[in-house]
């Protein structure tokens, strides 16, 4: 024979079986390809294969079995062309096991190679389709719904309200969803909480809004510091109307601790105000109880009837204020985006003094289980710590968390929300217009309902968010956050709830508060916690507030 072939390290294609009882393939007598091309040799071999394997028998089977010969197909190399034409090498390897044979060596069935390849391809297609359907079914089963928990990639499932990364709970499903989107987008608990608070200002005008006063408590797990947010003392815009402080207060909190750009937080609330939002059950109940005086056309049908559940409300004037606030580089200018328009509506030259929100260290009370943190005066935080200290000293809560005097008081209308991440950062926010729909005065130029929280209003008994940190020296220690609304006995209710928590084991405490520490009146209690590298959220009543996380 000629020179030995130079074998490449791997074939460019799989070897092709050729049935033949003769020596290696002869060269093709004629070809359409130019002499010296590798394609000519391959074509002639393929023709010989088709003629002998399918048409060379004239319909009869060969009496003897034939060995299988494989033609070696090499990577193209111009230097090998002459060698391939001289030799056309083929080697006997194994019998053709694809075509079954009887004991005499005859082929059984004589299934042509094209049909065999077609059957194999169909089998592979069927297997691939089955795997694809199974994968889609697996993905579809993990879709998360409101307040539910999908099995995480690690394969273990969680109870509702338990998440790997972060979570938010608020009175409105729309705002909980918006807060979750901000967390997923890379925001922290401050971004999620502020965005959700601005959302509530749009969809729950009966309880909060840009005319409301805000209090907050933020624990930073990275630094171990806890900070109280205050709107400052209540101020009067005009007799009976409180000075709005929401925008500068929330802008100050975000400027100090937020991560996402400030305009990003206002995209969702602005869209809801401009394009409309659906009236939910809490707003519909408030409208039915309050009536529509001063609230039309914002929350009324054309005939003056209040909007019911599922009706769409729009507030384009409020959307314009939010767009202006999104461009404000400082907290002061964020407030001025609203105050200038309000002054024009009321015929004022301008408010005598702007809001004075502050960020200051949280009040602390050491307890055997860790450190208690809350907001300073004029909130109800100091009262809460006094009650807790007395209860811990007497080793038991008061017999009646809702004494008759408090039950007879007018319940302040307020709104609460809470966010938490698995590292232990917590933000608790509470806000109020004082009464349902505040003063009932709807600013025509801004779409904002002003509060009736004025300088001579009662102390902010509705504001006393509380955080229990098991160890300030350990940034990975367990953290519990509580915030309540809708009752004049917030401090007493939270005292009872915390004592119940401290009386149980740490693991039981993470399952969320039960309804045994009842809420006075129609109140709401939110609880968030960071435990075992997971975020936990729950509420009393358990179905009052939608939560979402990831």
Image: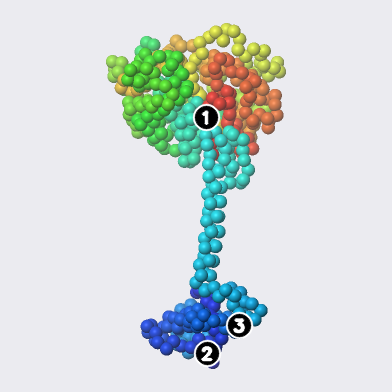
Mark pair 3, 1: CA separation: 76 Å
Q: CA distance from mark 2 to mark 3?
A: 31 Å
| First-in-chain label (2 vs 3) | 2
137 relative to 36, above or below:
above
Q: State yes or no: discs 2 and 3 in contact (Cβ < 8 Å).
A: no
Circle 1 is placed at which residue position?
546
- Local packing at callout 3 (Cα closer than 10 Å; few below 14, some 14-19, many 20+) is some
- The vertical placement of 121 against 385, above or below, is below
Image x and y of residue 515, in percent: 62, 22
- Hey, which quadrant is residue 31 in on the image? bottom left
The residue lying toward the viewer, choosing from 473 and 393, is: 393
Give the residue displayed 57% in from the left and 83% down from the top: 62
Q: Is residue 283 visible?
A: yes
Are circles 3 and 1 on residues that touch, CB within 8 Å?
Answer: no
* Residue matched to label 3: 65
Q: Which badge, 1 or 2, comes first in the chain's sequence?
A: 2
From the top left corner, tell me how far across and down residue 361 is, in percent: 54, 26
What x and y, as percent, mark residue 3?
Answer: 52, 90
Residue at the image position 38 percent from the left and 82 percent from the top: 33
Q: Which residue is mark 2?
A: 3
Work out whether residue 23 or residue 332 is closer to the camera in this orientation and state it.
23
Tag in front: 3 or 1: 3
Tell me the element at label 2. Answer: loop
């Amino acid at each position: 024979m000629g020179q030995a072939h130079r074998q490449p390290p791997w074939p460019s294609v799989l070897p092709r079986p050729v049935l033949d009882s003769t020596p290696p393939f002869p060269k093709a007598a004629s070809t359409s390809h130019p002499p010296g091309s590798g394609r000519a040799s391959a074509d002639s071999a393929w023709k010989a294969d088709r003629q002998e394997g399918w048409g060379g028998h004239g319909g009869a089977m060969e009496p003897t079995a034939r060995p299988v010969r494989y033609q070696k197909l090499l990577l193209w190399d111009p230097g090998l062309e002459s060698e391939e034409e001289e030799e056309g090498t083929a080697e006997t390897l194994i019998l053709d096991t694809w075509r079954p044979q009887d004991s005499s060596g005859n082929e059984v069935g004589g299934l042509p190679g094209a049909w065999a390849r077609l059957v194999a391809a169909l089998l592979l297609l069927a297997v691939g389709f089955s795997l694809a359907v199974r994968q889609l079914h697996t993905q579809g089963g993990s879709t998360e719904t409101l307040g539910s928990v999908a099995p995480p990639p690690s394969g273990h499932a969680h109870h509702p309200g338990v998440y790997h990364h972060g979570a938010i709970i608020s009175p409105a499903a729309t705002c909980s969803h918006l807060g979750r989107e901000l967390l997923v987008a890379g925001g922290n608990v401050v971004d999620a909480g502020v965005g959700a608070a601005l959302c509530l200002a749009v969809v729950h005008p009966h309880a909060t809004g840009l005319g409301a006063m805000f209090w907050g408590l933020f624990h930073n797990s990275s630094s171990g510091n806890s900070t109280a947010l205050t709107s400052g003392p209540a101020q009067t815009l005009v007799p009976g109307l409180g000075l709005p402080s929401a925008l500068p207060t929330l802008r100050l909190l975000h400027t100090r601790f937020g991560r996402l750009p400030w305009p990003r937080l206002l995209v969702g609330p602005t869209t809801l105000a401009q394009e409309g939002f659906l009236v939910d059950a809490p707003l519909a109940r408030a409208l039915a109880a309050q009536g529509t005086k001063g609230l039309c056309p914002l929350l009324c049908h054309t005939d003056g009837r209040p909007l019911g559940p599922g009706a769409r409300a729009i507030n384009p004037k409020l959307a314009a204020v939010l767009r202006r606030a999104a461009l404000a580089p400082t907290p002061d200018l964020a407030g001025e985006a609203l105050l200038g328009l309000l002054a024009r509506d009321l015929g004022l030259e301008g408010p005598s003094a702007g809001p004075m929100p502050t960020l200051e260290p949280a009040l602390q009370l050491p307890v055997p289980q860790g450190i208690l943190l809350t907001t300073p005066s004029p909130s109800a935080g100091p009262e809460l710590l006094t009650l807790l200290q007395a209860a811990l000293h007497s080793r038991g809560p008061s017999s009646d968390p809702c004494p008759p005097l408090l039950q007879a008081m007018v319940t302040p209308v307020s709104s609460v929300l809470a966010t938490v991440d698995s590292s232990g950062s917590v933000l608790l926010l509470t806000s109020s217009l004082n009464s349902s729909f505040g003063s009932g005065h709807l600013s025509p130029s801004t779409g904002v309902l002003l509060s009736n929280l004025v300088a001579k209003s009662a102390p902010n008994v509705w504001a006393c968010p509380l955080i229990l940190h098991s160890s300030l020296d350990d940034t990975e220690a367990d953290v519990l956050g509580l915030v309540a609304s809708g009752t004049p006995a917030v401090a007493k209710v939270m005292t009872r709830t915390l004592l119940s928590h401290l009386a149980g084991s740490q693991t039981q405490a993470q399952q969320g508060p039960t309804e045994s520490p009842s809420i006075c009146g129609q109140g709401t209690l939110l609880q968030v916690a960071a435990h075992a590298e997971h975020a936990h959220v729950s509420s009393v009543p358990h179905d009052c507030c939608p939560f979402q996380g990831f």
